Image: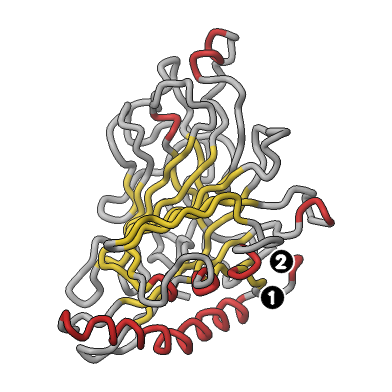
Amino acid sequence: MVGFVAAASPFQASAVSVVFEAGALGNIGPGNTNTTVNDGGTLDTPIAGKLELGGPVGSGLGTVLYVQTNGLAGLGTVAAPLFVTLTARSHLDNPNSNISDFQAGNFYITASDGTVKDNGLGVRPFTVDNSGNREAGNNPAIEGSKEVSGGTDPLSFAQRLAAGKVDGAPHVDERVLFTFAKPVLGSSINVVLTKFDATGTNGGLNNSEDVFDLIISRMSLPDLTFDNVRRSVPPGSAMMTYIGAEADQVVNLNFAGLLAYGLGVTDVVTSFSIRANDDNPSSPQGTAEHFLIDGLTATLPPPSVPDGGSTIALLGLALVLLPAAKAFQNKFAVRC
């Protein structure tokens, strides 16, 4: 499935959906094929204007994925403008360390196979040198988990080197930042996670409940921060629903479930980030939580609404979104 844009008059909202798989994004795998991206030990050749390495060595910037309103990777066209930019980030739990490239990551993206289960986008770390920087060049070495994963390392990078641990960077919590080219209605955002264990210790498949932090940046309003979100308690229980069988571990995050937790009906969102976190920080693990991000849908505000009528128009967006969001979930349900 590729993304779609609902037909819109100058005063109508439009719903956009994206599937984060190589084929759905326009065959951005190696050799311009529907092939898994960054699956081995070396970064695949970056694709200019679509999937790029990010900043130079030492910048701490991870890879960047650009996606248009038609669901394809790209910087945008007149017919399909840029919709969202994804950036791979990481968070070092130990604050007593220099900030360097091991705090960035690169995107892993599965090939499209017509299903949702086990598919989507993850973050993998770069192999680093003794300074904590990724190797130079367009194809530096990569390692570790293919999912967006959370982990805790008791040692800083300098402490690891002093202890003779030169086998890579410290464990980090990986983060994906979504930055919209044009602000979207916050309550319209839906994100699909796969390989997400939403049950955890009380009977979960891997006995460890997947947890994430969510930061939502709004236009002209303070950020909303939700730490340690899990399906078993609010606000996670208000925003998470299974798509298909629970055992498939495919979960939809509906931001409309946050309306009782600080998100306003008319709030306009400029960006948000999802960071995997450790579900049991009192007993930290190097690699704890893990999931892939397979889908995103959101509603763009009407492009030509006068300022005086923008509030009324935004109020109507929630109603406009309902059939689009339902259709989005049905598409994924069919693919499961």
Does 142 appear above or below 1?
Answer: above
Give the residue drawn at x 34%, y 38%: 61
* Secondary structure under the numbered disc 2 in the rendered image: helix
Find disc 1 in the rendering and name its residue: 244
| Mark 2 crowd level (few <14, some 14–19, many ≥20, 10 Å Cα) | some
Find the residue positioned furthest to the right: 203
Give the residue drawn at x 17%, y 83%: 308
Left or right: residue 253 versus residue 319 is right
Does 70 appear above or below 87?
Answer: below
The reply to whether residue 150 is in sight is: yes
Mark 2 vs 1: CB contact within 8 A: yes
The front one of 50 and 122 is 122
Instruction: Determine which quarter of the picture holds residue 130.
Output: top left
Quadrant in which the C terminus is drawn: bottom right
Indicate the position of residue 222 as horizontal and vertical percent values. Answer: 35, 56
Indicate the position of residue 84 as horizontal and vertical percent values. Answer: 33, 62
Give the residue drawn at x 30%, y 31%: 59
Q: In 3D space, how far apart are the residues under numbered discs 2 and 1 (Cα atoms)?
A: 7 Å
Find disc 2 in the rendering and name its residue: 248
* Mark linked to residue 290: none
Does 284 appear above or below 302?
Answer: above
Left or right: residue 19 versus residue 285 is left
Indicate the position of residue 233 as horizontal and vertical percent values. Answer: 68, 61
| Mark 1 crowd level (few <14, some 14–19, many ≥20, 10 Å Cα) | some
Which three-letter amino acid code belongs to the residue tagged 2? Asp
Which three-letter amino acid code belongs to the residue tagged 1? Gly
Does 335 appear above or below 6?
Answer: above
* Secondary structure under the numbered disc 1 in the rendered image: loop
